[in-house]
Amino acid sequence: MSVFRSILALLVLGLASPVLAEPIGFFQLSDTRYNPSVPAPEDRFGFGVGERPVRHDQMVSYLTEIAQGSDRITVETIGYTHEHRPILFFVVTSPENQSRIEDIRAAHLAQLDPAAAAGNGPAIVWLNYGVHGAEPSGMDAAIPMLYHLAAAEGAEIEQTLRDSVVLITAVFNPDGHNRRASLVEMFGSDIAVTDPAHAQHNWPSARTNHYWFDLNRQWLLQTQPESQAWLTQWHHWKPQVSADFHEMGTDATFYFHPGEPRRLNPLIPGRARELTRNIAQHHIGFLDQEARLYTTEEGFDNFYVGKGSTYPQVNGSLGILFEIGSARGGLIESNHGLVSHGDNVRTQFRTGLTTIAGALAQRREIAAYQRQFFADAAASAGRDRTRGYVFSAEGDPARLNLFLDLLDRHDVTVHALARDLRADGRTYRAGEAYIVPMQQRQYVMIRALFDRVTSFEENVFYDVSGWTLPLAYDLEYSALTGNLSAQSLGEVARPGNIAFSAPPVSSYGYVLRWSDYYAPRALYRLLDADIRVRIATETAMIMTHEGLIEFGPGTAFIPLVGQDVSAADIHDLAGRIAAEDGVPVYSATTGSTPGDTPDLGDRNGFRPVERPEILLLFDDGISLYDAGEVWHQLDHRMQIPVTLRRKSELAGLDWSRYTHLVVVGGNNTGFAGADLERIRDWIRDDGGVLIASRQAAQMAQRAFFDLDEDADDAAAETGEPVRRDYAAMPVDDAEHVIGGAIFAGDLDTSHPIGFGYSDRFIAVHRNTEFVLDRPEDDPFAVVVEYAADPLLSGYASQRRRDEIAGTPAVIAQRLGRGSVVMFADNPNFRATFRGPEKMFLNAVFFGGLINRPRGDY
């Protein structure tokens, strides 16, 4: 019998600590009485926590029952997931505090104003449970936590509840957790299988939400309903301490903050580390008492502000990350013995209690720190040379509204621009632009959103290094260095629904511009209704019901002649597009255009497009995150159906059904020989359009354009061998990485992939190190070229900057009857880079409009 099987036998016989599941007594504190009228989990589930996965619906039912039966707890549903599962939010405190909970919250927020008197209210502690569905102990810990807070009796718990308000979200990622529970149950066995290779221990897709987004990167970006729900509550309370519970690799032990001291975002005060370290002493006391292995202050950093443990720290709170070695399916072998899910849940639960205890032990110090954070922010804003930011989005009110919504979610105050303003050689017009003043409570958050950072103390990053969100949203924006005039600040702006009135009935046809964010959704609605649409390939002056208007390339013209759909139905759909998609629709009054612009019947100036039928590949080495971002962009935002198919399952596919194939990056974007030949034939002979990003773009160049795989390999350097200390490896290895940075590109707005843009400047996200080769026989193929000095924000070594400068960022080439569009990086990155997203959608709709050069170049 193996050592692991011997240990397992002893544990099952009860001769050692329990490993699978115990009644609630396993989680109860030995020196605490519990109210027997509060139902235990096993009374409702039929099994103990840790014995088998707790489904989300079971958890919702049980925790709601506890809350409704307790005068200490209130519960509300704060949002729903893509799969329409509820997200529950619990407020836990003493019955006396519950009776005046709104007064407590209002007083807490009021004392954050440096001009107001300091408060002396309860500590406000937030517990994040279950942001990653594949990390179940972080979610299941909410069960014993809420049971304990409801059922524990005695002077200690009553004092804790009087002195604190505990805010619990259960759970952050219901869809991912439900996927995990189903997969674990699918491969469950009567006898626990501890072999890490067992299928029950492997379900990476459960980490993410429905569209495969990592929700722990959503605190900043706010594109998913789960994060939008919880961040609303976070700012509703602005807690003083936020704890975030996770799992890591099975062979790891237990980690807690403070994080890596050398990688601290400069916007986070050093005092935050001191207070967090003091709280950590409470974790250490518990863990030492039980002789558990743990580590702190290493490996995990606090640089990227979009994570659950770092975002609070640029908003005046203390953020604490917990990471425990995962038990995966429930009980698994590790290099330090057997790891059980039930035991992990207990550890996460108990360190949740030590977080509350640590917060209460320095309650006044933490309250003073939070208050000082905002006082220092006000003082810094007063000294800052930048007094505010002005921004606009020419020709795209929907994209502008999306950015307003983002700022609103981060509690940033925005004003409408009341009068025209000149900055950076650009005129920002009243009614079309907005101002963010720096002098406001969220000064630090504004810095996190708007700053361009390109120099770093250390170039090792747990996540991306550059997040300048006005660049990501492709906004025109400028820093304002003079005093802001009160006359420039209009009313406080709020996001709203963008809707336009229906155009008047036309006797000729309708026009919609391509610069609007949801124009692709509108175009697909037209094509899906079997309405013929013609796309402008150059600027056209069109006479409309609002007079003569200049429309750019990409403009959609819907003629009334030659349609199989009635004019009345076309007008009805045009009205719904204006109202529902926020895309203005114009009535054309004549087909004649003035000057040199093409008439609406010009066969080259206005070309027909077909409805796209899209095949998106995933799995088998393709990045699930990248594929999910494409799926979300097309399906959720643009309402375009997408066929999802595993890359390894292409045999027998009816390729004639599809017009577009999307292949994203990953560690294996290559195809088997037969599949590669079929894709080449589909592009060359059937006119298919391949859209490839990151490593898949490099693969496409090699596979379809006869490039030598080793052509760009650097020659071996000569000279003396280099010897470096092993301890320097992490930093030296990272010297020439690109830490998720933002680069500047020059966009050919006359190219079909560049239709709908107002200027040639484009900001693109980049975290790959290779470069695409410039096509030698097609000088028109480079849609975007990196600037000579390309880095806008984030980290990239000078070597990488030099290598990337002037190289293609986006290439679009004909291949036979079809086209291949190649993105050096991910245009849909985390559903946030609104500029490159439009290029991706242009590839979907206009990939067939790309012409092949005829000259000898």
Image (cartoon, rainbow, N blue to C red):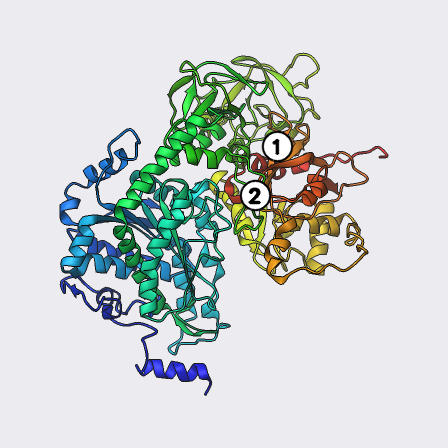
Q: Residue at x 52, y 13 (%)?
A: 546
Q: Crowding near pointer 2: few (<14 within 10 Å), some, many (20+)?
A: few
* x and y percentages locating residue 691 in the rendered image: 64, 44
* x and y percentages locating residue 673 in the rendered image: 72, 60
427 with respect to 77 (left or right): right
551 with respect to 332 (left or right): right
> Relative to residue 370, is residue 71 depicted above or below?
below
Q: Amino acid at mark 1?
A: Ile
The answer to whether residue 462 is seen in the rendering is: yes
Q: Residue at x 45, y 69 (%)?
A: 200
Tell me the number on the disc at residue 762: 1
* x and y percentages locating residue 279 in the rendered image: 33, 54
Distance in Å between CA atoms under marks 1 and 2: 24 Å
Q: Please identify the residue farthest to the right as the structure is shown.
A: 856
Q: Secondary structure at mark 2?
A: loop
Q: Residue at x 40, y 76 (%)?
A: 192
> Relative to residue 219, is residue 2 depicted above or below?
below
Q: Secondary structure at mark 1?
A: strand
Q: Please identify the residue farthest to the bottom as the structure is shown.
A: 1
Q: Amino acid at mark 2?
A: Phe
Q: Quadrant of residue 720?
A: bottom right
Q: Crowding near pointer 1: few (<14 within 10 Å), some, many (20+)?
A: many
* x and y percentages locating residue 629 in the rendered image: 52, 46
Give the residue pinned by disc 2: 456
Q: In this view of the protein, which residue sits in the foreground, 723 or 344?
A: 723
420 with respect to 856 (left or right): left
